[in-house]
Amino acid sequence: QVQLVESGGGLVEPGGSLRLSCAASGFTFSSYGMNWYRQAPGKEREWVATISPGGIVDCAGSVKGRFTISRDNAKYTVYLQMNSLKPEDTAVYYCNTNIPISPNRRLAYWGQGAQVTVSS
């Protein structure tokens, strides 16, 4: 079955860096786009970044220039490098992929989340 397991969260001071990892299993990782989302306390989950199977990336305006998404298909792992962290980046970060189960339907899979806290 599909599994996504995030790691690398923690507490960091403003201006610091963290790298999140998401280890995937149960599907052909190289064939699917991977996404990072985040959810801050009291707020809705929001999209952070996407990487296509071929490595094309995109990210939200709020993190552009600070966050970088990447993938290692051999390791079945997607990463989120976060630099110049701000207190407003504090959230639970989730790894996601969407896998087709029929011609018109995809099933979303989520990891358990990794807490990132930016505070002095």
Image: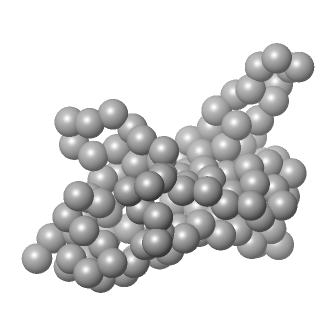
Quarter holding residue 30? bottom right
Quarter holding residue 119? bottom left
Q: Is residue 103 left or right of residue 2?
A: right
- In the current view of this chain or complex, which residue is farthest to the bottom? 16
Number of marks drawn: 0
User: Which residue sits at x=20%, y=64%?
Assistant: 87
User: Which residue sits at x=30%, y=53%?
Assistant: 91
Q: In the image shown, does 109 or 35 lie closer to the viewer?
A: 35
Q: In the image shown, does 2 or 119 lie closer to the viewer?
A: 119
Q: Is residue 55 left or right of residue 11?
A: right
Quarter placement of the N terminus:
top right
> How is the rendered protein coloured?
one colour
Q: Is residue 15 left or right of residue 119?
A: right
Residue 91 visible in the displayed image: yes
Percent from the top left, x then y, of residue 24?
Answer: 69, 56
Would you place residue 19 above or below residue 39 in this image?
below
User: Which residue sits at x=77%, y=64%?
Assistant: 55
- In the current view of this chain or complex, which residue is farthest to the left? 120
Percent from the top left, x then y, of residue 48?
Answer: 48, 52
Q: Is residue 68 left or right of residue 119?
A: right
Residue 5 visible in the displayed image: no
User: Which residue sits at x=34%, y=44%?
Assistant: 39
